[in-house]
Image (cartoon, coloured by chain):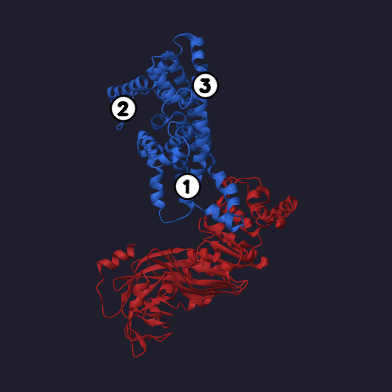
Chain colours: A red, B blue
Amino acid sequence: MQIDVKNLTKCYQRLTVLDRVNLQIRDKEFIGLLGPSGSGKTTLLRILAGLEIADAGAVQIDGRDSRTLSLDERRIGFVFQHYALFNHMTVFQNVAFGLEVKPRQARKSPAAIAERVRELLTLVHLQAFADRFPVQLSGGQRQRVALARTLAIDPKVLLLDEPFGALDAKVRVELRRSLRDIHDTAGLTTVFVTHDQHEALDLADRVAIMNRGIIEQVGTPVEIYSAPKSPFVFDFLGHTNSFDCVVRGGEAYLGESQLALDEVIRDGPAVAFVRPHDIIVSRTNAAAETGVRLPGTARVRFISALGQRAISELLYDKRLIEAEMTPQRLQELGLQVGSKCVISLRNPRVYPRQQAEEQTRVAERAAVRPRKRRRFRDRLSTLR
Amino acid sequence: MAKAAQRQNGVREQTLPLSESRGVRTLLIAVAVGFFILFLLLPLIVVFVEALRHGLLAYWTALSEPDALAAMRLTLLTALVVVPINTVFGVAAAWAITKFSFTGKDLLITLIDVPFSVSPVIGGMVFVLLFGLQGIFGAWLAAHDIKIIFAIPGVIIATLFVTLPFVARELIPLMQKQGSEQEEAALMLGANGLQTFLRVTLPNIKWGLLYGVLLCNGRAIGEFGAVAVVSGHIMGLTNTMPLHVETLYNDFNFVASFAVASLLVMMAFATLILKTVLESRAA
């Protein structure tokens, strides 16, 4: 089913939770609503489910206003963050619930219901647990019961609120895969809410990034990661190093070097955001060929080389910069705590400074020129 | 076990930094035990001693006397009418308060507590002022020959008032803690309101509900103040058991008085035992 969200607005008392949100969810799409807590993503999901009523705007399902549709016509399944399993019922009874509460003429025979429940329990690998109660299950098993219970009503749309939030990392990745499989085989349209960037980018066809009641950007994971439209999106998706720069005559300058601009930005103070893996560390000036070379040198403060990625913290111009490289590269460079090095930047993204300050918590910026004194307030905000 | 462990280690009694000295401990325990005996145990024993002073036969005679039987019947009737009504009210109020948000919700929560905070005598007085001969509806009621005050309806209304908060008070915190996620899940699965209530809400609150009903019942049987004001103490007609106890006592009929009182005490014990059982089931 195609879902159109049009100008949806929701306020709690004076707080605007959703501010004229527009979003088109295509048929059979798997879409992630990603944002920090309080960004309005769960409220949006609950309005889609009909559990909450918007103050303005509309949700259209296949072109029809969702408020005019009966529950049966909407065919929406909802998986709650804490599963909301019926604790006084067994796993079997939980899954059968949606089938048993149907009006008599639409209800299947008890034998057919039992058959369907067994099918669903097999799908989520819980055949052996039919007679257990929810308290006797692990978090991942409860989640799978919740999923099976929802699938019992043959939904066309599946809505999931932080589906893996309360699970440990390994179970989470397993469940992600099986959810994706179920989505693909059942031909569902799925919307899930998460605050976990990796989960959203890993799982979804498209991701909508939300912040303070608006959708900042919608796109495929690749689009969003490679071209974040706003400083918020950039910062939210991963670790951010930021450098003061300036836009003059439509060109961005970081010290002496000119930076590429992806979009037109008004003249004035700006910041360049750079991912840790786009910070290129070298030992000599001559070796620093690629990217935008920063003047002066940096000193290594800390190195963590566990697994596939080596993270080093560099002190440059009184700010800490995080650089990421392969352990091999780290060895080649022979970096140790206290080593001096030079830095160049790859793929910097430039945003107006005011917008960046409003939208992100990146308070520490390496000011290339002019030097700015780091304020106490900034240091405080990095501690938060 | 702690003692055995101590003996095994050959450790003499130690004073931990946070525990009191032996003298203070003995004193505190003595105070607690003394209070318990003087104010809880002795009065209960006295009730039975007085009731059985002239033997079992006198006890039995006092209980099988027509006025005593009438008092028992009235008390049971009151409980039978009041408890179901207040159960329905309590469930409805708790449901409304915890599962929905509406204007006046805080006011409703406060109002439910009024019978707890106001003296029962005031509760009785209010109904005399409303339904008594000189009361607001008095003239109309008299004209239609409806007797409320100094009659059984008055007793029931006063008891209703006094026992109104018990079920709601028991359920509100419980249902607040449970939230409405399970109900929402039921609705999303296609259940209607009644199915949601019967299949999801009710099983989740049943122990708390039983507990509230039990407390409500205990109070309905034992209520004195409010009922005393509206009943008029008509022997064999509007006297409930607690009122009957008082009437007999005032007539210096101590054995009969304490015999009826002993029944109330036994009912209270039964309530307490059931309550303990329910609490362990609910936990």
Q: Residues within 10 Å of mark 2 (few under 14, many from 20)?
A: few
| Identity of the residue furthest to the bottom in this view | A249
Q: Quadrant of the N terminus of chain A?
A: bottom right
| Identity of the residue furthest to the top in this view | B54
Q: Residue at x 68, y 66 (%)?
A: A185
Q: Nearer the viewer, mark 3 or mark 1?
A: 3
Asked if the residue at tag 2 contacts the one at tag 3, i.e. Cβ–Cβ closer than 8 Å, the answer is no
Q: Looking at numbered disc 2 in the image, what kind of residue is underneath it?
A: Thr
- Residue A281 visible, this orientation: no
Chain letter of disc 1 in the image: B
Q: Looking at numbered disc 1 in the image, what kind of residue is underneath it?
A: Ala
Do dots 1 and 2 share one subunit? yes
List x then y, in percent, for residue A239: 42, 69
N-terminal-most mark, 3 or 1: 3
Q: Residues within 10 Å of mark 3 (few under 14, many from 20)?
A: some
Q: Which residue is mark 3?
A: B69
Q: Which residue is mark 1?
A: B93
Looking at the picture, does residue B96 appear above or below residue A236?
above
Q: Which residue is mark 2?
A: B15
List x then y, in percent, for residue A74: 61, 66
List x then y, in percent, for residue B145: 48, 36
